[in-house]
Amino acid sequence: MEKVLEIKGLTKRYGRLLAVNKLSLEVPRGSVFGILGPNGSGKTTTLGILLDVIQPTAGDFLWFGAKADNKVRKEIGAILETPIFYPYLTAYENLNIVAEIKGADKSNIEKVLETVELLHRKDDKFKTYSLGMKQRLSIASALLNDPKVMILDEPTNGLDPKGIAEIRDIITKIARDGKTIILASHLLDEVQKVCSHFAVLQNGKLLYQGLVEDVSKGEMVVEVAANGHDLAATLEGFEGSKKVVKDFDKWVVSLEEGFGSTELNQYLHGKSITASHLLTQKKSLEKQFLEILEESNENKVG
Amino acid sequence: MNNILRLLKIDFLKFKNYRAFWVISILYSLLIISIPVAVMEFLKWLKEKGAEFEGFDPLKIPVLYFPDIWQNITYVFIFFKLFLAIIVIISISNEFSFKTVRQNIIDGMSRTEFALSKLTFIAALSLYSAVLVGLTGMATGLIYTPSLEGVNVFQGFSFMGAYFVDIFATLLIAFLLTLLIKRSGLSIAMFILIWPIEYIAAAYIPDSMDFMSEYFPLHAINNLIEFPYPKYIFREIQDWVSMESLFVVVLYIAGYIAFILRRLKTSDL
Protein backbone atom coordinates (compact mmCIF):
# COMPACT_ATOMS: atom_id res chain seq x y z
CA MET A 1 0.00 0.00 0.00
CA GLU A 2 1.21 3.45 -0.88
CA LYS A 3 2.41 5.46 2.05
CA VAL A 4 1.59 9.10 2.47
CA LEU A 5 3.71 9.55 5.54
CA GLU A 6 6.53 7.58 7.08
CA ILE A 7 7.98 8.49 10.47
CA LYS A 8 11.23 6.92 11.60
CA GLY A 9 12.53 7.14 15.14
CA LEU A 10 11.27 10.67 15.72
CA THR A 11 12.44 12.18 19.02
CA LYS A 12 11.92 15.58 20.59
CA ARG A 13 13.49 16.51 23.89
CA TYR A 14 12.70 19.68 25.85
CA GLY A 15 15.41 19.75 28.47
CA ARG A 16 14.69 16.76 30.68
CA LEU A 17 11.26 16.15 29.21
CA LEU A 18 11.02 13.64 26.39
CA ALA A 19 7.99 14.87 24.44
CA VAL A 20 8.32 12.40 21.57
CA ASN A 21 10.24 9.19 22.10
CA LYS A 22 11.57 7.26 19.07
CA LEU A 23 8.23 7.35 17.32
CA SER A 24 7.83 5.33 14.13
CA LEU A 25 4.60 5.28 12.16
CA GLU A 26 3.27 4.78 8.66
CA VAL A 27 0.14 6.35 7.28
CA PRO A 28 -1.33 4.63 4.20
CA ARG A 29 -2.95 6.63 1.41
CA GLY A 30 -6.67 7.13 1.71
CA SER A 31 -6.82 6.23 5.37
CA VAL A 32 -8.37 8.27 8.12
CA PHE A 33 -5.64 7.90 10.68
CA GLY A 34 -6.47 8.66 14.29
CA ILE A 35 -3.69 9.53 16.72
CA LEU A 36 -5.00 8.89 20.19
CA GLY A 37 -3.49 9.82 23.46
CA PRO A 38 -4.15 11.63 26.68
CA ASN A 39 -3.37 15.35 26.83
CA GLY A 40 0.37 15.89 26.81
CA SER A 41 1.14 12.58 25.14
CA GLY A 42 3.09 14.23 22.32
CA LYS A 43 0.44 14.37 19.61
CA THR A 44 0.72 18.07 18.85
CA THR A 45 4.50 18.05 19.17
CA THR A 46 4.66 15.22 16.63
CA LEU A 47 2.39 17.06 14.20
CA GLY A 48 4.38 20.26 14.77
CA ILE A 49 7.55 18.45 13.72
CA LEU A 50 5.85 17.00 10.64
CA LEU A 51 4.86 20.55 9.67
CA ASP A 52 8.31 22.08 10.30
CA VAL A 53 7.31 24.42 13.10
CA ILE A 54 9.17 22.34 15.69
CA GLN A 55 12.70 21.07 15.23
CA PRO A 56 13.14 17.37 16.04
CA THR A 57 16.00 16.30 18.29
CA ALA A 58 16.46 13.13 16.26
CA GLY A 59 14.72 11.01 13.68
CA ASP A 60 13.30 11.45 10.24
CA PHE A 61 10.08 11.61 8.35
CA LEU A 62 9.08 11.34 4.71
CA TRP A 63 6.04 12.89 3.08
CA PHE A 64 5.07 11.02 -0.10
CA GLY A 65 8.35 9.14 0.13
CA ALA A 66 10.55 12.24 0.04
CA LYS A 67 12.25 14.57 2.49
CA ALA A 68 9.92 17.39 3.34
CA ASP A 69 10.30 20.93 2.09
CA ASN A 70 7.84 23.79 2.07
CA LYS A 71 6.39 22.75 -1.31
CA VAL A 72 5.07 19.56 0.27
CA ARG A 73 3.26 21.61 2.90
CA LYS A 74 1.39 23.49 0.19
CA GLU A 75 -0.31 20.18 -0.58
CA ILE A 76 -1.13 19.51 3.04
CA GLY A 77 -4.04 21.20 4.75
CA ALA A 78 -3.31 21.44 8.42
CA ILE A 79 -4.53 22.97 11.62
CA LEU A 80 -2.62 22.66 14.87
CA GLU A 81 -4.32 23.20 18.23
CA THR A 82 -6.40 26.38 17.93
CA PRO A 83 -7.48 28.17 14.74
CA ILE A 84 -4.86 30.79 13.88
CA PHE A 85 -5.71 33.82 11.76
CA TYR A 86 -5.13 37.57 11.71
CA PRO A 87 -7.91 38.73 14.06
CA TYR A 88 -8.26 42.17 12.46
CA LEU A 89 -8.82 40.74 8.98
CA THR A 90 -12.01 39.26 7.57
CA ALA A 91 -12.41 35.58 6.77
CA TYR A 92 -11.99 36.34 3.08
CA GLU A 93 -8.86 38.43 3.61
CA ASN A 94 -7.35 35.75 5.82
CA LEU A 95 -7.99 33.02 3.27
CA ASN A 96 -6.62 35.33 0.60
CA ILE A 97 -3.28 35.33 2.43
CA VAL A 98 -3.34 31.55 2.75
CA ALA A 99 -4.18 31.22 -0.96
CA GLU A 100 -1.25 33.50 -1.79
CA ILE A 101 1.10 31.38 0.35
CA LYS A 102 -0.14 28.07 -1.03
CA GLY A 103 -0.41 29.28 -4.60
CA ALA A 104 -4.05 28.24 -4.56
CA ASP A 105 -6.66 29.49 -7.00
CA LYS A 106 -8.48 32.52 -5.55
CA SER A 107 -11.79 31.13 -6.82
CA ASN A 108 -11.41 28.35 -4.25
CA ILE A 109 -11.91 30.79 -1.38
CA GLU A 110 -15.65 31.13 -1.77
CA LYS A 111 -15.97 27.42 -2.50
CA VAL A 112 -14.38 26.33 0.75
CA LEU A 113 -16.28 28.96 2.71
CA GLU A 114 -19.42 27.46 1.23
CA THR A 115 -18.32 23.96 2.30
CA VAL A 116 -18.09 25.02 5.92
CA GLU A 117 -21.15 27.25 5.67
CA LEU A 118 -19.40 30.52 6.36
CA LEU A 119 -19.93 32.24 3.04
CA HIS A 120 -22.49 34.63 4.48
CA ARG A 121 -19.93 35.77 7.08
CA LYS A 122 -16.96 36.12 4.72
CA ASP A 123 -16.66 39.89 5.19
CA ASP A 124 -16.75 39.80 8.97
CA LYS A 125 -13.56 40.10 10.94
CA PHE A 126 -12.13 36.87 12.35
CA LYS A 127 -12.21 38.22 15.92
CA THR A 128 -16.01 38.47 15.75
CA TYR A 129 -16.38 34.74 15.10
CA SER A 130 -17.59 32.19 17.65
CA LEU A 131 -15.29 29.30 18.52
CA GLY A 132 -17.23 26.91 16.29
CA MET A 133 -17.00 29.31 13.37
CA LYS A 134 -13.27 29.74 13.96
CA GLN A 135 -12.82 25.96 13.86
CA ARG A 136 -14.83 25.76 10.66
CA LEU A 137 -12.83 28.57 9.11
CA SER A 138 -9.61 26.73 9.85
CA ILE A 139 -10.99 23.64 8.15
CA ALA A 140 -11.92 25.82 5.17
CA SER A 141 -8.39 27.17 5.17
CA ALA A 142 -6.96 23.65 5.25
CA LEU A 143 -9.14 22.69 2.28
CA LEU A 144 -8.13 25.72 0.24
CA ASN A 145 -5.54 24.12 -2.02
CA ASP A 146 -7.44 20.86 -2.54
CA PRO A 147 -4.88 19.07 -0.33
CA LYS A 148 -3.90 15.43 -0.65
CA VAL A 149 -3.56 15.12 3.09
CA MET A 150 -5.32 16.87 5.91
CA ILE A 151 -3.98 17.14 9.43
CA LEU A 152 -6.54 17.99 12.06
CA ASP A 153 -5.45 18.46 15.65
CA GLU A 154 -8.35 18.23 18.10
CA PRO A 155 -10.77 19.74 15.58
CA THR A 156 -13.75 19.54 17.93
CA ASN A 157 -12.01 20.94 20.98
CA GLY A 158 -14.25 23.24 22.98
CA LEU A 159 -17.26 22.88 20.71
CA ASP A 160 -20.84 22.26 21.73
CA PRO A 161 -22.55 19.03 20.59
CA LYS A 162 -23.99 20.70 17.51
CA GLY A 163 -20.60 22.07 16.55
CA ILE A 164 -19.01 18.66 17.10
CA ALA A 165 -21.59 17.02 14.85
CA GLU A 166 -21.00 19.63 12.14
CA ILE A 167 -17.23 19.16 12.17
CA ARG A 168 -17.67 15.39 12.13
CA ASP A 169 -19.92 15.66 9.08
CA ILE A 170 -17.33 17.78 7.32
CA ILE A 171 -14.58 15.27 8.13
CA THR A 172 -16.63 12.32 6.86
CA LYS A 173 -17.43 14.25 3.71
CA ILE A 174 -13.75 14.99 3.11
CA ALA A 175 -12.78 11.37 3.79
CA ARG A 176 -15.32 10.20 1.24
CA ASP A 177 -13.50 12.30 -1.36
CA GLY A 178 -10.54 9.95 -0.90
CA LYS A 179 -8.31 12.35 0.99
CA THR A 180 -5.97 11.03 3.63
CA ILE A 181 -6.76 12.49 7.00
CA ILE A 182 -4.59 12.46 10.08
CA LEU A 183 -6.67 13.25 13.13
CA ALA A 184 -5.23 13.79 16.56
CA SER A 185 -7.72 13.56 19.35
CA HIS A 186 -8.25 12.52 22.90
CA LEU A 187 -11.89 11.84 22.15
CA LEU A 188 -12.04 8.11 21.50
CA ASP A 189 -15.58 8.06 20.39
CA GLU A 190 -14.69 10.63 17.73
CA VAL A 191 -11.86 8.50 16.41
CA GLN A 192 -14.00 5.36 16.38
CA LYS A 193 -16.70 7.14 14.41
CA VAL A 194 -14.54 8.57 11.65
CA CYS A 195 -11.20 6.73 11.55
CA SER A 196 -10.05 3.65 9.68
CA HIS A 197 -6.66 3.34 11.41
CA PHE A 198 -5.47 4.42 14.79
CA ALA A 199 -2.36 4.69 16.90
CA VAL A 200 -2.06 5.23 20.61
CA LEU A 201 0.57 7.51 22.09
CA GLN A 202 1.54 7.93 25.69
CA ASN A 203 4.41 10.04 27.03
CA GLY A 204 5.65 10.41 23.49
CA LYS A 205 5.84 6.66 22.88
CA LEU A 206 3.85 4.60 20.42
CA LEU A 207 1.89 2.02 22.40
CA TYR A 208 -0.29 0.52 19.74
CA GLN A 209 -1.11 0.79 16.06
CA GLY A 210 -3.94 -0.98 14.23
CA LEU A 211 -7.20 -0.92 12.36
CA VAL A 212 -10.31 0.48 13.99
CA GLU A 213 -12.42 -2.36 12.54
CA ASP A 214 -10.22 -4.91 14.34
CA VAL A 215 -11.20 -3.42 17.66
CA SER A 216 -14.72 -4.78 17.40
CA LYS A 217 -13.52 -8.20 16.20
CA GLY A 218 -12.53 -11.03 18.42
CA GLU A 219 -14.35 -11.67 21.64
CA MET A 220 -17.90 -10.50 21.96
CA VAL A 221 -19.82 -9.22 24.95
CA VAL A 222 -23.56 -9.86 25.39
CA GLU A 223 -25.90 -8.26 27.90
CA VAL A 224 -28.61 -10.58 29.20
CA ALA A 225 -31.64 -10.04 31.41
CA ALA A 226 -34.16 -12.80 32.07
CA ASN A 227 -36.45 -14.17 34.73
CA GLY A 228 -35.54 -17.37 36.42
CA HIS A 229 -33.47 -18.00 39.43
CA ASP A 230 -29.81 -18.64 39.42
CA LEU A 231 -29.38 -17.10 36.01
CA ALA A 232 -25.73 -16.54 36.77
CA ALA A 233 -25.02 -20.20 37.22
CA THR A 234 -26.94 -21.02 34.07
CA LEU A 235 -24.98 -18.47 32.10
CA GLU A 236 -21.70 -19.74 33.48
CA GLY A 237 -22.76 -23.19 32.40
CA PHE A 238 -22.78 -22.12 28.75
CA GLU A 239 -19.80 -23.64 26.98
CA GLY A 240 -18.95 -20.34 25.22
CA SER A 241 -18.93 -18.08 28.21
CA LYS A 242 -15.68 -16.81 29.49
CA LYS A 243 -16.76 -14.43 32.19
CA VAL A 244 -20.10 -13.43 33.70
CA VAL A 245 -20.42 -10.14 35.53
CA LYS A 246 -23.47 -8.52 37.09
CA ASP A 247 -24.17 -5.02 35.89
CA PHE A 248 -27.06 -3.53 37.86
CA ASP A 249 -30.15 -5.48 36.64
CA LYS A 250 -28.36 -7.29 33.82
CA TRP A 251 -25.68 -9.86 33.39
CA VAL A 252 -22.77 -9.13 31.11
CA VAL A 253 -21.35 -12.22 29.46
CA SER A 254 -17.99 -12.19 27.70
CA LEU A 255 -17.95 -14.90 25.05
CA GLU A 256 -15.17 -17.02 23.66
CA GLU A 257 -14.28 -16.47 20.03
CA GLY A 258 -16.68 -18.20 17.67
CA PHE A 259 -19.65 -17.77 19.99
CA GLY A 260 -22.29 -15.09 19.56
CA SER A 261 -25.62 -14.02 20.89
CA THR A 262 -27.44 -16.55 18.66
CA GLU A 263 -25.69 -19.50 20.28
CA LEU A 264 -26.30 -18.07 23.73
CA ASN A 265 -29.98 -17.52 23.02
CA GLN A 266 -30.40 -21.10 21.77
CA TYR A 267 -28.73 -22.39 24.91
CA LEU A 268 -31.05 -20.37 27.14
CA HIS A 269 -34.05 -21.67 25.19
CA GLY A 270 -32.85 -25.17 25.79
CA LYS A 271 -32.86 -24.37 29.51
CA SER A 272 -36.46 -23.02 29.14
CA ILE A 273 -35.38 -19.48 29.87
CA THR A 274 -36.64 -16.62 27.72
CA ALA A 275 -34.44 -13.59 27.72
CA SER A 276 -36.23 -10.27 28.17
CA HIS A 277 -33.11 -8.42 27.10
CA LEU A 278 -30.35 -9.61 24.84
CA LEU A 279 -27.88 -7.10 23.46
CA THR A 280 -24.60 -7.61 21.68
CA GLN A 281 -22.07 -4.98 22.66
CA LYS A 282 -19.41 -4.09 20.18
CA LYS A 283 -16.19 -3.64 22.00
CA SER A 284 -15.52 0.05 22.05
CA LEU A 285 -12.29 1.77 21.19
CA GLU A 286 -12.52 3.37 24.58
CA LYS A 287 -12.30 0.00 26.26
CA GLN A 288 -9.45 -1.09 24.04
CA PHE A 289 -7.66 2.20 24.66
CA LEU A 290 -7.94 1.88 28.41
CA GLU A 291 -6.68 -1.70 28.19
CA ILE A 292 -3.70 -0.59 26.16
CA LEU A 293 -2.85 2.16 28.63
CA GLU A 294 -3.33 -0.23 31.55
CA GLU A 295 -1.06 -2.84 29.99
CA SER A 296 1.65 -0.29 29.44
CA ASN A 297 1.40 0.90 33.02
CA GLU A 298 1.64 -2.67 34.29
CA ASN A 299 4.71 -3.22 32.14
CA LYS A 300 6.29 -0.17 33.68
CA VAL A 301 5.61 -1.38 37.20
CA GLY A 302 6.81 -4.87 36.27
CA MET B 1 12.68 38.33 -8.15
CA ASN B 2 9.09 37.29 -8.79
CA ASN B 3 9.20 35.31 -5.62
CA ILE B 4 10.48 38.32 -3.68
CA LEU B 5 7.60 40.42 -4.99
CA ARG B 6 5.17 37.65 -4.05
CA LEU B 7 6.58 37.61 -0.50
CA LEU B 8 6.30 41.39 -0.28
CA LYS B 9 2.71 41.14 -1.47
CA ILE B 10 1.91 38.58 1.24
CA ASP B 11 3.27 40.90 3.89
CA PHE B 12 1.37 43.82 2.39
CA LEU B 13 -1.89 41.82 2.53
CA LYS B 14 -1.34 41.46 6.27
CA PHE B 15 -1.03 45.23 6.62
CA LYS B 16 -3.51 46.46 4.05
CA ASN B 17 -6.39 46.59 6.48
CA TYR B 18 -4.44 47.16 9.68
CA ARG B 19 -5.42 50.55 11.02
CA ALA B 20 -2.40 51.15 13.27
CA PHE B 21 -0.08 50.76 10.29
CA TRP B 22 -1.84 53.46 8.30
CA VAL B 23 -2.19 55.83 11.25
CA ILE B 24 1.54 55.68 12.03
CA SER B 25 2.57 55.86 8.37
CA ILE B 26 0.39 58.87 7.61
CA LEU B 27 1.48 60.63 10.78
CA TYR B 28 5.09 59.99 9.89
CA SER B 29 4.67 61.26 6.34
CA LEU B 30 2.91 64.43 7.44
CA LEU B 31 5.64 65.09 9.97
CA ILE B 32 8.37 64.75 7.33
CA ILE B 33 6.61 67.02 4.88
CA SER B 34 5.73 69.67 7.44
CA ILE B 35 9.10 70.14 9.10
CA PRO B 36 10.86 72.18 6.37
CA VAL B 37 7.81 74.39 6.15
CA ALA B 38 7.84 74.83 9.91
CA VAL B 39 11.55 75.67 9.91
CA MET B 40 11.13 78.36 7.29
CA GLU B 41 8.10 79.79 9.03
CA PHE B 42 10.11 79.87 12.24
CA LEU B 43 12.95 81.78 10.56
CA LYS B 44 10.42 84.20 9.07
CA TRP B 45 8.91 84.70 12.48
CA LEU B 46 12.36 85.37 13.92
CA LYS B 47 12.92 88.02 11.32
CA GLU B 48 9.55 89.64 11.90
CA LYS B 49 10.20 89.75 15.60
CA GLY B 50 13.30 91.61 14.69
CA ALA B 51 15.73 89.13 16.16
CA GLU B 52 19.00 90.20 14.65
CA PHE B 53 22.06 87.96 14.51
CA GLU B 54 24.44 90.85 14.66
CA GLY B 55 22.84 92.44 11.66
CA PHE B 56 22.37 89.11 9.89
CA ASP B 57 19.07 88.19 8.23
CA PRO B 58 17.99 84.81 9.62
CA LEU B 59 16.37 83.95 6.29
CA LYS B 60 19.79 84.13 4.71
CA ILE B 61 21.14 81.25 6.77
CA PRO B 62 21.45 78.60 4.03
CA VAL B 63 20.03 75.76 6.12
CA LEU B 64 17.56 74.72 3.46
CA TYR B 65 19.56 75.80 0.40
CA PHE B 66 21.28 73.50 -2.04
CA PRO B 67 23.70 71.92 -1.42
CA ASP B 68 23.58 72.18 2.38
CA ILE B 69 20.03 70.91 2.52
CA TRP B 70 20.80 67.21 1.98
CA GLN B 71 22.97 66.80 5.02
CA ASN B 72 20.83 69.15 7.09
CA ILE B 73 17.50 67.45 6.50
CA THR B 74 18.74 63.87 6.53
CA TYR B 75 20.41 64.58 9.87
CA VAL B 76 17.12 65.79 11.33
CA PHE B 77 14.74 63.38 9.65
CA ILE B 78 16.72 60.37 10.74
CA PHE B 79 15.43 60.94 14.29
CA PHE B 80 11.90 60.10 13.16
CA LYS B 81 12.91 56.55 12.32
CA LEU B 82 11.38 55.59 15.66
CA PHE B 83 8.00 55.70 13.92
CA LEU B 84 9.20 53.24 11.30
CA ALA B 85 10.78 51.04 13.95
CA ILE B 86 7.43 50.88 15.75
CA ILE B 87 5.77 49.72 12.53
CA VAL B 88 8.40 47.00 12.14
CA ILE B 89 8.12 45.93 15.77
CA ILE B 90 4.32 45.67 15.54
CA SER B 91 4.60 43.74 12.29
CA ILE B 92 6.94 41.15 13.80
CA SER B 93 5.44 40.90 17.28
CA ASN B 94 1.94 40.45 15.82
CA GLU B 95 3.15 37.38 13.97
CA PHE B 96 4.32 35.90 17.24
CA SER B 97 1.46 36.94 19.50
CA PHE B 98 -1.18 35.80 16.99
CA LYS B 99 1.04 32.74 16.24
CA THR B 100 0.50 33.47 12.58
CA VAL B 101 4.18 32.89 11.85
CA ARG B 102 3.46 29.28 12.78
CA GLN B 103 0.43 29.08 10.51
CA ASN B 104 2.34 30.74 7.64
CA ILE B 105 4.94 27.98 7.85
CA ILE B 106 2.29 25.26 8.19
CA ASP B 107 0.52 26.67 5.14
CA GLY B 108 3.65 26.23 3.08
CA MET B 109 6.04 29.16 3.52
CA SER B 110 9.59 28.12 4.16
CA ARG B 111 11.21 29.69 7.20
CA THR B 112 13.60 31.54 4.91
CA GLU B 113 10.69 32.84 2.87
CA PHE B 114 9.06 34.16 6.01
CA ALA B 115 12.26 36.01 6.92
CA LEU B 116 12.60 37.31 3.38
CA SER B 117 9.04 38.59 3.32
CA LYS B 118 9.76 40.65 6.43
CA LEU B 119 13.18 41.78 5.18
CA THR B 120 11.65 42.89 1.89
CA PHE B 121 8.97 44.76 3.77
CA ILE B 122 11.65 46.50 5.83
CA ALA B 123 13.61 47.37 2.69
CA ALA B 124 10.44 48.75 1.09
CA LEU B 125 9.67 50.81 4.18
CA SER B 126 13.23 52.22 4.19
CA LEU B 127 12.93 53.01 0.50
CA TYR B 128 9.59 54.74 1.03
CA SER B 129 11.12 56.88 3.75
CA ALA B 130 14.14 57.74 1.61
CA VAL B 131 11.96 58.67 -1.38
CA LEU B 132 9.70 60.78 0.82
CA VAL B 133 12.66 62.61 2.35
CA GLY B 134 14.33 62.94 -1.06
CA LEU B 135 11.24 64.50 -2.62
CA THR B 136 10.66 66.76 0.36
CA GLY B 137 14.32 67.87 0.24
CA MET B 138 14.18 68.48 -3.48
CA ALA B 139 10.97 70.50 -3.26
CA THR B 140 12.21 72.50 -0.26
CA GLY B 141 15.54 73.23 -1.94
CA LEU B 142 13.89 74.34 -5.16
CA ILE B 143 11.51 76.62 -3.30
CA TYR B 144 13.95 78.27 -0.90
CA THR B 145 17.32 78.36 -2.65
CA PRO B 146 17.50 82.02 -3.72
CA SER B 147 19.22 81.41 -7.03
CA LEU B 148 19.50 78.06 -8.79
CA GLU B 149 21.99 79.38 -11.29
CA GLY B 150 25.19 77.34 -11.29
CA VAL B 151 23.79 75.11 -8.50
CA ASN B 152 24.02 71.34 -8.79
CA VAL B 153 20.93 70.17 -6.91
CA PHE B 154 22.42 66.69 -6.53
CA GLN B 155 25.58 67.84 -4.81
CA GLY B 156 25.58 66.14 -1.43
CA PHE B 157 22.89 63.72 -2.58
CA SER B 158 25.06 60.87 -1.26
CA PHE B 159 23.54 61.74 2.12
CA MET B 160 20.30 60.29 0.79
CA GLY B 161 22.11 56.99 0.21
CA ALA B 162 23.52 57.16 3.72
CA TYR B 163 20.02 57.94 4.98
CA PHE B 164 18.61 54.80 3.35
CA VAL B 165 21.40 52.62 4.77
CA ASP B 166 20.93 54.19 8.21
CA ILE B 167 17.16 53.52 8.23
CA PHE B 168 17.54 49.99 6.88
CA ALA B 169 20.20 49.04 9.45
CA THR B 170 18.14 50.53 12.29
CA LEU B 171 14.97 48.72 11.24
CA LEU B 172 16.95 45.47 11.09
CA ILE B 173 17.93 46.06 14.71
CA ALA B 174 14.22 46.52 15.52
CA PHE B 175 13.43 43.25 13.70
CA LEU B 176 16.17 41.41 15.53
CA LEU B 177 15.17 42.74 18.95
CA THR B 178 11.54 41.77 18.39
CA LEU B 179 12.58 38.33 17.22
CA LEU B 180 14.31 37.86 20.57
CA ILE B 181 11.76 39.60 22.81
CA LYS B 182 8.56 38.83 20.84
CA ARG B 183 6.34 41.24 22.81
CA SER B 184 5.64 44.60 21.17
CA GLY B 185 5.67 46.88 24.23
CA LEU B 186 8.84 45.40 25.62
CA SER B 187 10.52 45.49 22.22
CA ILE B 188 9.71 49.16 21.70
CA ALA B 189 11.03 49.99 25.19
CA MET B 190 14.20 48.00 24.51
CA PHE B 191 14.63 49.64 21.12
CA ILE B 192 14.57 53.04 22.79
CA LEU B 193 16.83 51.93 25.66
CA ILE B 194 19.67 50.51 23.56
CA TRP B 195 20.72 54.03 22.52
CA PRO B 196 21.49 55.38 26.00
CA ILE B 197 22.89 51.97 26.97
CA GLU B 198 25.41 52.03 24.15
CA TYR B 199 26.42 55.64 24.78
CA ILE B 200 26.91 54.98 28.48
CA ALA B 201 28.96 51.91 27.67
CA ALA B 202 31.05 53.98 25.25
CA ALA B 203 31.66 56.58 27.95
CA TYR B 204 33.04 53.95 30.29
CA ILE B 205 35.55 52.27 28.04
CA PRO B 206 39.16 53.23 28.81
CA ASP B 207 40.67 56.09 26.79
CA SER B 208 43.19 53.85 25.12
CA MET B 209 40.33 51.81 23.64
CA ASP B 210 38.27 54.85 22.78
CA PHE B 211 38.54 54.35 19.01
CA MET B 212 36.63 51.09 19.50
CA SER B 213 33.44 52.88 20.45
CA GLU B 214 33.15 54.25 16.92
CA TYR B 215 32.56 50.67 15.78
CA PHE B 216 29.74 49.97 18.22
CA PRO B 217 26.57 49.17 16.26
CA LEU B 218 24.68 52.38 16.96
CA HIS B 219 27.78 54.60 16.82
CA ALA B 220 28.55 53.09 13.45
CA ILE B 221 25.10 54.03 12.19
CA ASN B 222 25.34 57.54 13.62
CA ASN B 223 28.67 58.06 11.88
CA LEU B 224 26.96 57.91 8.50
CA ILE B 225 25.53 61.42 8.71
CA GLU B 226 27.67 63.77 10.80
CA PHE B 227 26.23 66.69 12.77
CA PRO B 228 26.10 69.53 10.21
CA TYR B 229 25.10 72.66 12.08
CA PRO B 230 28.40 73.84 13.61
CA LYS B 231 29.36 75.02 10.17
CA TYR B 232 27.00 77.96 10.59
CA ILE B 233 29.20 79.22 13.38
CA PHE B 234 32.21 78.66 11.15
CA ARG B 235 33.44 75.37 12.57
CA GLU B 236 34.74 72.65 10.34
CA ILE B 237 32.48 69.65 9.86
CA GLN B 238 32.54 66.44 7.86
CA ASP B 239 30.26 67.33 4.98
CA TRP B 240 30.63 64.06 3.09
CA VAL B 241 29.69 60.42 3.71
CA SER B 242 32.73 58.46 4.78
CA MET B 243 33.18 55.24 2.85
CA GLU B 244 34.67 53.62 5.91
CA SER B 245 31.53 54.32 7.98
CA LEU B 246 29.38 52.99 5.16
CA PHE B 247 31.45 49.84 4.95
CA VAL B 248 31.16 49.20 8.70
CA VAL B 249 27.38 49.59 8.60
CA VAL B 250 27.06 47.32 5.56
CA LEU B 251 29.02 44.68 7.48
CA TYR B 252 26.62 45.06 10.40
CA ILE B 253 23.65 44.74 8.03
CA ALA B 254 25.05 41.47 6.67
CA GLY B 255 25.51 40.28 10.25
CA TYR B 256 21.96 41.19 11.28
CA ILE B 257 20.45 39.44 8.27
CA ALA B 258 22.54 36.34 8.88
CA PHE B 259 21.49 36.26 12.51
CA ILE B 260 17.79 36.77 11.67
CA LEU B 261 17.83 33.99 9.08
CA ARG B 262 19.62 31.63 11.40
CA ARG B 263 17.34 32.37 14.30
CA LEU B 264 14.19 31.84 12.25
CA LYS B 265 15.57 28.67 10.71
CA THR B 266 16.53 26.93 13.92
CA SER B 267 13.98 27.90 16.54
CA ASP B 268 10.71 26.23 17.45
CA LEU B 269 7.86 28.45 16.37
Image: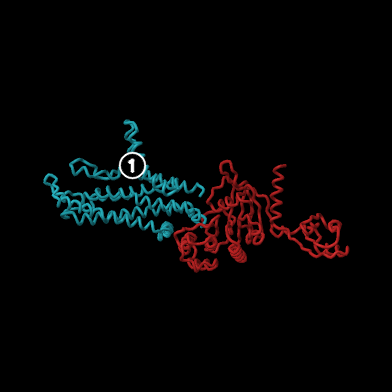
Chain colours: A red, B cyan
Residue B173, given in percent of the width and then of the height, sits at 39, 46
User: In this rendering, does residue B1 appear at all?
Assistant: no
Can you tell which quarter of the image residue B134 is in? bottom left
Residue nearer the viewer, A212 or A238: A238
Q: Amino acid at mark 1?
A: Ala
Q: Is residue A252 left or right of residue A95?
A: right
Q: Quadrant of the C terminus of chain A?
A: top right
Q: Residues within 10 Å of mark 1 (few under 14, many from 20)?
A: many
**Residue B192: image location, x then y, percent:** 36, 45
Image coordinates of residue A11 in percent, x first then y, are 60, 46
Element type at mark 1: helix
- Tell me which residue sits at (81%, 60%) in the image: A259
A131 vs B141, nearest the viewer: A131
Q: Quadrant of the N terminus of chain A?
A: bottom right
Where is residue B210? Give x, y as percent.
32, 34
**Residue B190 appears in view:** yes
Q: Chain of mark 1?
A: B
Q: Which residue is mark 1?
A: B220
Q: Identify the residue at horizontal 42%, vertical 49% (top origin).
A: B184
